[in-house]
Every structure is written in structure tokens, then in C-alpha cells.
Amino acid sequence: MADGPTINTIAERAGVSIASVSRVLNGLPTRQETVRKVMAAADELGYVRNAVARSLKSRRTHQVAFAMADVGNPAYLAMLRQIQPVLKAAGYRLVLHSTDAVVADEIDVLHSLGERYVDGLIMSPLRVTETHLEMLAAARAPVVIIGSVPEGTRVDNVRADSRTGVRLAVDHLHSLGRRRIGMINGPLDTVPGAARGAAYREALGDVDLPYDESLVQIGDFYRAEGGRAVAELLARVPDVDALMCANDLIALGALDVLRAAGRRVPDDVAVVGMDDTDLAAASWPSLSSVSLGSAERGKAAAELLLDRLQGDDREPRLVTVPPRLVVRASTAGESAAEGRTDAEADAQARSDAAAREGLQGREGAEARTEGKEGRA
């Protein structure tokens, strides 16, 4: 084997046909299990692929891009940790873009699909503009969007159910006797900001609480901005007794400001975040948060894209990942002896029951085509 391994030796090691090895190495649609066997055999034998020659011949790069709004947000990192292994197992490298939610940068990424520097794209935009939709319609490579898109958009779509998630949070706060429940939101021209703001108003009605505009403060989806928004709300409405925050970073900013103001959490003000990132469990006090399934959404998006790259030509599919409230010390308090109060356990049980109810009649995050009714 002085000249190095050949496709014949790779086929023998992998236990597949020479034709299958050729298809895998040339980037042609092939079953994922076959791709895994061939790539493992090639690595074991020390086969070095000429990526440039292969891409010129097949017009495939074996690269996929992931464009996220903020690389500093742990929710996107949770997606990334699931996207990368799925694609790597199929022989794809991942190219990362952090757009800082700048629409022009996202449009540039979509435009570059025409240059074929990647074979496909996973994108999680905070805003979906008409230009986004035009570029998606004209895309020359498969695209999967994590987040909501307008009904009728012909693109594979993985989304969270923010509406149910906010309801879980407000129900939980209401069950603890909180009646002055404030909302700290991100910009309303973003998909999550609009969806979570509308869901908050609806959830208050569900528990017979009036909507009070003075209890709503708009900031941005960052810790410092969240803190500033909370400070403004406290100055305007000092008797607020609970905060529903549009993401965990905002909620962490809220904890910072409440601590500095001498407000006890949760005794004086209970706080709930959204995303249930790694930071939620590590904060002090630990943060109750609504999990929107960031990891599950990342994995589902990677699997949808991989299906397209392997030749799946079905109608665009929608995956909806159900939310789950994770109750911690920022709402229910914490027992030094038990590490968990009865109220915390009861609230968690209610959340689990609500999540099961929300799943009734659907199979969790299974991909399927359905009406895209505007969840984010």
C-alpha cells in the first residue's frame, strides 16, 4: 500500500461496494449509514481526500454554514453542539457566521449560497424581512430556518412554541400568588420579541389579570440591556412582584439589578427567564426558565438539512419543539436541606402536565408539514 489506500481497499474495509465508496467520496446522495462506514474506513486507512478536486468535479464542497444572531448567547451554542456532530457524521464540515442580528450580514450569507462555497445553510435570524424571503425563494442550495417564518414560505422550518412557553411561565408566577407580573422583552420588530410580547398579554388574560402597559419594558436580548430595562421598570412600578423575561440573558441582568437594589429574589420579586441555558442553573439564585429546546431544535435542523443534501425532495417540513418550564430558586425558593421546596416540586409537576397536554395529538419534534401559525 505504498501509494496509499484506494477506493477498493476502502470498500473492502467498510464492507460496501466500490460504487458506494465512489458516491460518498464524490459527495453524491448516499444513505447516512453508508457514509458513516465509508468515512470511518477512509480515516482508519489514512485516506487523504483532495477536497478541491472533488468539489470541482461534483460541485459539492462538503461544507455547511450555520448563521446565528449572537455567538455569545448560550442558546445558539446549545444548537451548535447538536448541529456539528450530526453533520460531521455525514462527512460535512461546519462554517460558522455570527451576524449580530444585522440583516445585511444575513442577506450576504444567503447571497453567498449562489457562489457554492457551502452545500447548505442553517440560519436562525431574529428578523425575517421581505429581502430574506426573496433570497430564500431564490436559494440555490438547501436552507433550514430555526425560528418562525411567514405562512406559505417554502423552506424547512424548526421552531419553538413561545406562546405555550410564556403561558407556562405566567401560570407558574400566578400560582405563587404574584399579581404584578412585569414583562422585560426584546425589540418588538424581532420574531421572538413580537411573539413573546403577544403571548404575555394573552397569558395574563388566561389567569384573569389585566394587561397593564406600565408593567412592560422593552430592551434588547442582552444581559446589560436587560438590567437597564429592569431598572427603568422598577423606577416606574416599584410594587412589581414578578418578572417574565424574554430570554435568560435579560433575566440574569434582572437578577443583577434586583440584587443591587436590595430586592430579595424570590421573596420580593420572582424571576423567570426563557431558553433554559447553562447559565440558568449556574446563576445565583438559580434561575427558573422555560426551556425552548435549543438543543433539540439544532439537531432537528441538522437532520432536515442532511435529508435535503441526500436528495429528499418532499414538501417543506415544519418541526415544532414543545417548551418545558424548569423551576429553580428564583421563583420557588430553595431549601438548604432538601435543595427543592414543595412549591418548587408542585410547580414542576404542573409544568410537566401542561407540556404533556400541549403534546397531545402530536409526536413532539417529529418533522411534518403543517400550517405555520406564527410561533417563534
Image (tube, rainbow, N blue to C red):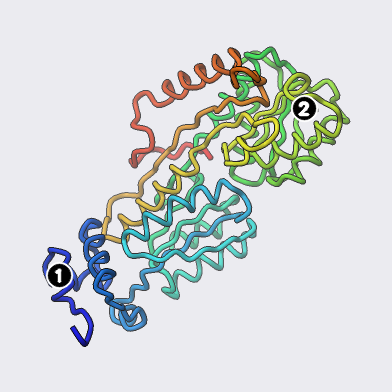
Identify residue type, mark 2.
Leu
Looking at the image, residue 96 lies above or below residue 80: below
Q: Position of residue 182 (x, y in %)?
A: 73, 27
Q: Determine which residue is flagged by label 1.
A: 11
Instruction: Calculate the distance from the C-alpha at mark 1 to the C-alpha at mark 2.
Output: 66 Å
The reply to whether residue 139 is visible in this rendering is no
- SS assignment at label 2: helix
Q: Determine which residue is flagged by label 2.
A: 215
Residue at figure coordinates x 36%, y 46% from the top left? 317
Residue at figure coordinates x 39%, y 53% from the top left? 302
Extreme right residue here? 235
Please name whichever residue, 2 or 266, is drawn nearer the observer in this view of the structure: 2
Q: Position of residue 144 (x, y in %)?
A: 43, 54
Q: Nearer the viewer, mark 1 or mark 2?
A: 1
Disc nearer the start of the sequence (1/2): 1
Q: Are marks 1 and 2 in contact (CB under 8 Å)?
A: no
**Splitting the image into 4 quarters, where does residue 176 fall?**
top right
